Image: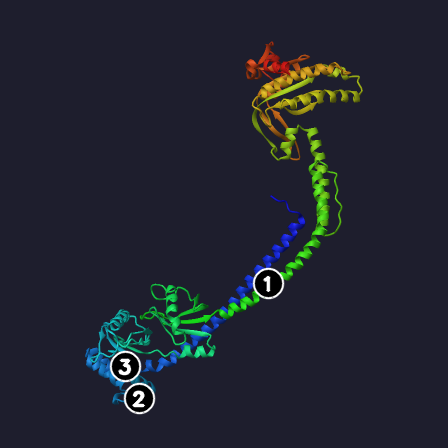
């Protein structure tokens, strides 16, 4: 992998930053433009929907009033209750189709009626533009004698009958004058969109449902035409009913494609899955809004559809996109120049920090880097110098800790692996003591005593470490070492035996050149002890406790010059590896029974290794 310099990385970072900011700006701008246009379209659609509702109420109010007057007319209710179809439709004709009948004039004289509405309905009936049916109390269709609506195809009549079945099934819960939409196809191929009003007929005294009047009048698309003019052609809309689009403002060449696209957004019940969605129609991206016109109606769902072109929004987006790219290009050029200047100012102190870290890695904790500024780089250099001082101090502490404690114990303490407390372990403990030390040093100067002990202990300590032992403590002229804690090496007893024999040899070698020849006695004991950190929370000492430790200490007292005394457990552990001589049973202080001990003469495998080396 190619290693890049800091300067190149900074340049790449600045370019990436500018590119990311540019991309984010473009994205945010696009979202904002689309949200702005969407909000505009939503507001226009709400205005259109409200306008449509107002126009519908104004348009249907007179018709609803005429139907209510007919539903409340006693003569019509009597005819409906009797089931006389001819009489029923005679009353319908007198009230709706021929409003100049005497009974209607009497009704108007009583303060009711709408002559304009009556005249309009009469004209629609004469032009065969209406749909009229009466249902009895059971919801059965009472067809008129002259079968009005005969201008429809047979399939359309069947469809109307199916659509009226929903009204028949809801007679018990029928609301007052719900509005629905139907689009029957005439025999001449013309599809007429009708607004259908269902008026329930109920007995005035018992409120029992007697039947219903179903009246459909032609839908007048005045609202969508007016809104299209108000928006200067920006809004195109219509009515979506049973997979058919009825519109005057959407171009005829686009209606077929539009109908197919809308069909994908409509569920099985004929209602839209979303209230708004995008589509491309005629090569132009557009936004479509839906609104259900007849909720809770027994008739098929009809939706008001509005179509808005997104071409203007996309042109605005494109213009802003080019402006942002132009500004971003200039910003990137400025960023390159600025990054070069910054890189030059940062490269020198960073190189000095790199050199300082290399010195730290090589073990030179006395290194210092110059603090060239008061900014973050200067703070970094200052912190680096403080870190170097801290590392130097820790190195001193580590060195001192290794001097006052065994290296393995010290490392475990530093790593937090040892804490206050202990565990039961099987180990081998070794004691080494100078014979006749008190008499030898009685008249010896203290400095000479310390010098002699330091020479002696240094050599023996090194032998303990070579054999995987842990130096537990120095007690005057006595050395205590443990094998098997805090870490076991599987052959701890054998290591301790080899260490003891090697100590005897080393002491004999030192006696040839030392000012003060010394004789040592060594003891070894093996068994279960408690090993761990003991003391206080702020002053710990890793050691071992138990009768095996006491036994090793007592055996050391009985070890003669150049002699290694071991207990029974140690002898058993060494087995055929060791050459031992039994000693007389020992009566040791602190032990009720006599102790069987052996003198270790040698280790066969160790002697072979020594001869080969």
Q: Residues within 10 Å of mark 1 (few under 14, many from 20)?
A: some
Q: Crowding near pointer 2: few (<14 within 10 Å), some, many (20+)?
A: some
Q: Which structural element holds mark 3?
A: loop
The image shows residue 4 at horizontal and vertical percentages of 64, 47
Q: Does any portion of residue 541 appear in the rendered image? A: no
Tell me: 479 left or right of 63: right
Whichever of labels 2 and 1 marks the residue nearer the N terminus, that label is: 2
Disc 3 vs disc 1: which is toward the camera? 1
Residue 217 position, x and y percent, is 32, 79
Distance from the alpha carbon under mark 2 to that under mark 3? 26 Å
**Circles 3 and 1 in contact, beta carbons < 8 Å:** no
Residue situated in front as seen by the camera: 559 or 506: 506
> The N terminus lies in which quarter of the figure?
top right
Q: Nearer the viewer, residue 83 or 433?
A: 83
Q: Which residue is mark 3?
A: 128
Tell me: 226 left or right of 464: left
Question: Can you see residue 395?
Answer: yes
Residue for badge 1: 325
- Which colour scheme appears in the figure? rainbow
For residue 274, above or below residue 472: below
Q: Is residue 391 above or below residue 470?
A: below
**Residue identifier under label 2:** 108
The percent position of residue 208, horizontal first and vertical second, equals 26, 75
In what quadrant of the picture does the C terminus appear?
top right
Determine the CA span between mark 2 and mark 1: 74 Å
| Real-space Cα separation, disc 3 to disc 1, in angstroms | 64 Å
**Residue 329 sits in which quadrant?**
bottom right
Nearest the viewer among 492 and 564 is: 492
- Which comes sooner in the sequence, label 2 or label 3? 2
């Amino acid at each position: 992998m190619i290693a890049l310099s800091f300067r190149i990385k900074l340049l790449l970072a600045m370019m990436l930053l500018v590119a990311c900011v540019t991309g984010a700006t473009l994205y945010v701008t696009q979202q904002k433009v689309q949200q702005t246009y969407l909000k505009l379209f939503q507001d226009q659609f709400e205005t259109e929907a409200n306008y449509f509702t107002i126009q519908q109420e104004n348009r249907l109010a007179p018709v609803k009033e005429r139907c209510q007057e007919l539903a409340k007319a006693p003569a019509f209710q009597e005819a409906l209750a009797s089931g006389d179809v001819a009489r029923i439709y005679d009353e319908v004709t007198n009230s709706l189709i021929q409003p100049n009948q005497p009974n209607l004039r009497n009704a108007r004289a009583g303060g009711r009626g709408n002559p304009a509405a009556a005249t309009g309905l009469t004209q629609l009936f004469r032009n065969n533009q209406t749909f009229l049916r009466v249902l009895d109390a059971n919801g059965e269709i009472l067809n008129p004698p002259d079968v009005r609506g005969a201008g429809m195809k047979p399939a359309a009549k069947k469809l109307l009958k199916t659509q009226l079945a929903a009204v028949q099934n809801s007679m018990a819960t029928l609301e007052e004058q719900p509005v629905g939409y139907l689009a029957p196809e005439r025999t001449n191929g013309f599809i007429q969109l009708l607004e259908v009003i269902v008026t329930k007929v109920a007995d005035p005294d018992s409120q029992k449902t007697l039947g219903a009047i179903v009246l459909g009048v032609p839908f007048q698309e005045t609202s969508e035409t007016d809104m299209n003019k108000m928006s200067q052609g920006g809004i195109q809309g219509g009515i979506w009913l049973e997979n058919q689009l009825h519109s005057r403002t959407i171009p005829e060449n686009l209606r077929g494609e539009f109908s197919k696209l809308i069909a994908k957004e409509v569920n099985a019940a004929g209602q839209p899955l979303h209230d708004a969605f995008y589509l491309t129609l005629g090569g132009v991206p557009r936004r479509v809004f839906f609104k259900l016109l007849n909720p809770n109606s027994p008739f098929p769902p009809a939706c008001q559809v509005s179509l808005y072109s997104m071409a203007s929004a996309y042109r605005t987006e494109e213009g802003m996109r080019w402006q942002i790219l132009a500004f971003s290009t200039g910003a990137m050029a400025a960023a390159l120049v600025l990054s070069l200047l910054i890189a030059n100012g940062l490269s020198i102190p960073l190189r000095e920090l790199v050199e300082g870290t290399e010195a730290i890695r090589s073990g030179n904790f006395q290194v210092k880097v110059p603090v060239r500024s008061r900014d973050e780089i200067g703070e970094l250099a200052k912190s680096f110098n403080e870190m170097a001082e801290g590392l130097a101090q820790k190195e001193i502490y580590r060195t001192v800790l290794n001097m006052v404690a065994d290296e393995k114990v010290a490392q475990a303490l530093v790593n937090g692996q040892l804490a206050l407390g202990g565990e039961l372990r099987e180990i081998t403990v070794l004691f080494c003591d100078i014979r006749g030390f008190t008499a030898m040093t009685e008249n010896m100067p203290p400095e000479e005593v310390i010098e002699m002990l330091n020479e002696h202990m240094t050599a023996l300590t090194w032998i303990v470490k070579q054999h995987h032992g842990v130096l537990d403590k120095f007690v005057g002229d006595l050395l205590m070492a443990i094998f098997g804690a805090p870490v076991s090496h599987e052959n701890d007893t054998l290591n301790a035996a080899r260490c003891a024999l090697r100590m005897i040899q080393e002491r004999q070698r030192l006696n040839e050149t030392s000012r003060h020849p010394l004789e040592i006695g060594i003891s070894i004991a093996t068994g279960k002890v408690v090993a761990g950190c003991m003391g206080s929370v702020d002053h710990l000492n890793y050691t071992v406790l138990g009768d095996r430790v006491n036994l090793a200490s007592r055996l050391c007292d009985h070890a003669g010059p150049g002699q290694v005394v071991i207990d029974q457990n140690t002898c058993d552990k060494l087995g055929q590896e060791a050459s031992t001589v039994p000693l007389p049973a020992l009566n040791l202080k602190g032990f009720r029974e006599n102790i069987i001990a052996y003198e270790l003469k040698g280790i066969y495998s160790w002697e072979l290794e020594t001869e080969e080396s």
